[in-house]
Amino acid sequence: MQNAFSYLASFFVALFLFFSCSPQPSEEEDASAEVPATDSIAIEKRLNKYTTVRLEPEMAHLSANQQELVALIIEAAHLMDDMFWYEAYGKKDSLLQVVNDVETEKFININYGPWDRLANNEPFVEGVAPKQAGANFYPADMSKEEFEQSNLPDKTSLYTFIRRNEAGELTTIPYHVAFEEQVVRAAELLKEAAALAENEGFKNYLNLRAEALLTDNYQPSDLAWMDMKDNDIDVVIGPIETYEDQLFGYKAAHEAYVLLKDQEWSERLEKYVAFLPELQTNLPVEAKYKQEQPGSDADLGAYDVVYYAGDCNAGSKTIAINLPNDEEVQLQKGTRRLQLKNAMRAKYDEILVPISELLIAADQRQYITFNAFFANTMFHEVAHGLGIKNTITEKGTVREALKEHASALEEGKADVLGLYMITQLHEKGELEGDLKDYYTTFLASIFRSVRFGASSAHGVANMIRFNYFQEKDAFVRDEESETYRVNYEQMRQAMNDLSQEILVLQGEGDYEGVAALVDANGAITDQLQADLDRLAEKNIAVDVVFEQGTEVLGFSASRQP
């Protein structure tokens, strides 16, 4: 099969334009005006992949100052939308101005461009070329070889665009220069919010994050974010994940989450972080692949989402966060794992339960529970802290060595090691419920996530795990009932085997080995596709779209982005 991350490289000449505030190497003709309208029936079918959920968490306990603070950071978060649009596509207005129907415009906004993120980035606007693997981070005509041979010291930086100068040579442009107008305004808003913050740790973080947006130096604010423990309001904002860059996986994309901490649920989760060193030691792999020790100053909490923007709001929506991604911060302090409880509940009720009723064996459906779904998702994020961040073969970090495959393999690692952690903690008596709950809900969740497709690192990770587990007889499909049944002992063995394989690939920085794993297991089989088609026929949504913002929250319309 073709590599799951490869995309056709040709685009229409100058399909992408730079924002007027961004440095431009040359004047380019806007070709997007040639794009005709789309098929309204096809767009309606695509829109049916999503179900709408209102983000309106309880806000009454917040003071007037806190509500104003939330409104300010929502406004700052909205600016991340502008920057992500440019990173994913180019000039948003050049596309929307030629679209003449509301439904197509709505779907374009869901996807931040004319490519369907839940259909492997398939173009849904007639005349639009396939999406560049490198999105808009690199010139459309740049080859991998040209990039690798270029002598640009900051070319692999998370926070630079690769562009051409007037001589046609590759050059770099820092994010804070390309997005000067947006980052200046976002920094102002964060500083205004900091002045209202009642929590000193949060105040310090907001001020440092404002400076980070202006300089692209994010480590001080990441360290400050790790030190926050008791604030009720939180925000994740800036260029963070590298999923959008499927050419090399080097470039971070802008996003934002505005969050309210559920203190009661968070207190219930705190005890699990203490087990990380022991779980790292017991990983089913040779000692050299687990020689790093996860930071002990980690945090595990439950939150309700108030607002999504940018990368995390594009296509499939994130329901848990594990940050920062900075390997130095991770080794020094660990990470914070944020479980987005209201978004998780929406996906469980609207998507996972209907999937289970169609695809899970009738006598095993009793093991599908929200607590298991929450725990599986939570320990997926915790498991990002296990394993190894730096290769043992002097190839740099795992992210640098595995390039565009790094994100998918890391998500796959977190999936199987999350289940491994659940198994270990359950045996120690530290986790309640029947182990069958976690394993059965885990299988049902594969059907949910594999529908995200090959354009999503999570989707690819789930394809790999589904095919690997099926080969190991971790589950079987009953032809008569057309449902799947978990084989619990075989699933445990498959979990250990895949954990070991992934940890070794990461530790070795084995780019070719990871590519082979993706090629062998990264495709949806005909039978699985037929079962996924049955979900679509039953109008079971693939993901959610949020109604959100200050108006939904009942705030003053003057702060509505």
Image (cartoon, helix red, strand yellow):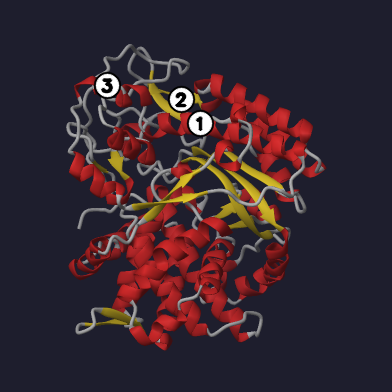
The residue carrying pointer 2 sits among few (fewer than 14), some (14 to 19) or many (20 or more) residues within 10 Å by Cα, namely some
* Dot 3 amino acid type: Ala
The residue carrying pointer 3 sits among few (fewer than 14), some (14 to 19) or many (20 or more) residues within 10 Å by Cα, namely some
* Dot 2 amino acid type: Thr
| Residue identifier under label 1 | 154
Q: As drawn, is 93 to the left or to the right of 219?
A: left
Residue at (46% x, 71% y) in the render: 499
**Residue nearer the viewer, 179 or 480:** 480
Q: Are marks 1 and 2 in contact (CB under 8 Å)?
A: yes
Residue at (61% x, 29% y) in the render: 559
Q: Can the viewer see residue 389? A: no
Label 2 to label 3: alpha-carbon separation: 19 Å
| Local secondary structure at mark 2 | strand
| Local secondary structure at mark 1 | loop
Q: Earlier in the sequence, mark 1 or mark 2?
A: 1
Residue 185 position, x and y percent, is 61, 23
The residue carrying pointer 1 sits among few (fewer than 14), some (14 to 19) or many (20 or more) residues within 10 Å by Cα, namely some
**Residue nearer the viewer, 378 or 412:** 378
Q: As drawn, is 530 to the left or to the right of 132?
A: left
Residue 177 position, x and y percent, is 53, 21
Label 1 to label 2: alpha-carbon separation: 7 Å
Residue at (65% x, 62% y) in the render: 294
Q: In the rendered image, which quarter contains the N terminus?
A: bottom left
Residue 118 position, x and y percent, is 31, 50
Q: Nearer the viewer, mark 3 or mark 1?
A: 3
Above or below 223: residue 100: above
**Where residue 14 is drawn, which disc sits there?**
3
| Residue identifier under label 2 | 172
**Where residue 186 is drawn, which disc sits there?**
none
* Dot 1 amino acid type: Asp
Residue 315 position, x and y percent, is 38, 47
Label 3 to label 1: alpha-carbon separation: 25 Å
